[in-house]
Image: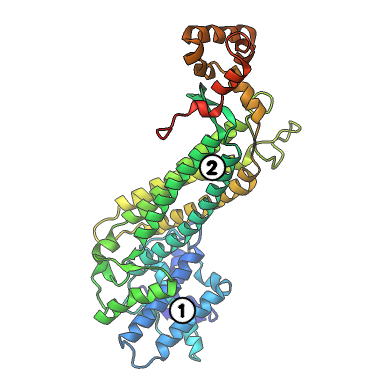
Amino acid sequence: MREEFDTVGSKMIPDDAYYGIHTARARENFPIPCLPNDPELLKNFLKIKEAAALANKAAGRWSDDKVPDAIVEACHDIADHFEDYEEEFRLPSIQGGAGTSTNLNVDEVIANRAIELLGGKKGDYKLVDPADDVNKAQSTNDTFPTAGHLTIIYYTQKLIDQLKEDIETLKELSAKYHDALKVGRTQLEDAVPTTFGRSFHAYVSMFSRDIKRLQQAVDDLMVIPMGGTAIGTGLNTTPEYLRQIVPQLSKITGLPLKQADDLIDGIQNSDLFVEASSAYRALAVNLSKMSHDLRLLNSGPQAGLHEINLPRKQAGSSIMPHKVNPVIPEVCNQVCFQVIGHATTVTMCAERGQLELNAWEPVSFMDLFADAKMLTAALKTLNDNALKGLTVNVDRCREMVEHSSQAATALSPVICYERVNELIQESFDTGKSIRELAVGKDLSAEEFDKLMSPSNFFVSKND
């Protein structure tokens, strides 16, 4: 065991541990059964520490290059073999101190690995000090939110990529069933007919708006508060460091990052996280709505709408033979409920950020990372296990249109409103379709088919 010291006192740390006293105290103080710090958040912290070492080196903050070079090498080594170090970073996402424990934890692990690279023993902080060297010209105030920005960007870009795949599948369905008539419904009551081609394309338009919102959130998060140190003052930095830090980080991450014009604002205000959360929530609302639609259209098969067939994925009952449930839309719905709930947490965290610092970013980040990952996974299983195998019961849908009283509205301009009303009543009384009753008496088969064709139900300003 080795003895380490901090403001509170001393503590014994295992000799083989890369973490130090601050990590040990955090593990004791925050025994919260929640998700641990996200691996991508920690990897982005490594990039921040590497960028800071390079910026400080360029600013001449060390007497020689061995310490910054060891820090950079340690960051690379930990990132390249992250699984080997993962236990060293084990801290709960929800923690007091506005992320300070996470920042200190990363500093300690990097410092001890850098010490090894310089031939020393872990804990020999005279060689590389976690605070004076690894955290040089930094504060949790700017590193933690910056790591959050980078991680949200990473997961949101993956979410956008997956959403684009779902959109492509919906476009294919729209083209395949372009002329497949179906009964339109308002308030779950029959309305005038539409086509599945139009319905699927409406989902394309809906999700395309989600991509715009997500991309806007990503673009705004490219502006980071790095260099602000304590509350955005830039205390303990140098002009050269401030010029270097964001370009260095941009080069390492490959992202077009920009330093916030107002670092005080960049550190104390969290509306950018609300913006990202709002984009997730809007996507969740849209995804959940479409999932509900799919469940309704798939319902039955004997006693429901049964207008579409979702792929049969697993048994749906422990007692009813042959029952299959729409499990894929259902899992999507539940993900969406969770994301919508998380949006309230992120909103309250931003609203409660008093004065010069937001102390609630740890739980905001936990929820935001989870939201992006869950939505990505939900969209992937929806695409792979539902949309790609979805089929439309074209004949059944056409039959329902021909029995629909509202579909008969299309006949009114030709055989008059009152006669259509009589046909509808006769259809109700006899169970016969409007087609059976009208063809041969009021219209020829060709005339009826023309009036009931998909093109007759849509008027374009370009026609």
Q: Is residue 419 left or right of residue 233?
A: right
Q: Rounded to the nearest whole Å, what is the CA distance between mark 1 and mark 2?
A: 39 Å
Q: Position of residue 67 (x, y in %)?
A: 41, 88
Amino acid type of the residue that numbered disc 1 sits on in the rendered structure: Ile
Q: Nearer the viewer, residue 150 or 298?
A: 298
In this picture the colour scheme is: rainbow
Above/below status of 198 relative to 368: above
Q: Nearer the viewer, residue 110 or 3?
A: 110
- Say whether marks 1 and 2 touch (CB < 8 Å): no
Residue highlighted by disc 2: 334
Disc 1 is placed on an element classified as helix
Q: Is residue 126 visible?
A: no
Q: Which of the 4 quarters of the picture holds residue 181?
A: top right
Q: Nearer the viewer, residue 346 or 326?
A: 326
Comparing marks 1 and 2, which lies closer to the viewer?
2
Q: Residue at x 64, y 46 (%)?
A: 385
Q: Residue at x 61, y 43 (%)?
A: 387
Q: Residue at x 41, y 35 (%)?
A: 462
Q: Which of the 4 quarters of the picture holds residue 437?
A: top right
| Label 2 Cα crowd, 10 Å radius (few <14 / some 14-19 / many 20+) | some
Residue highlighted by disc 1: 110
Image quadrant containing the C terminus: top left
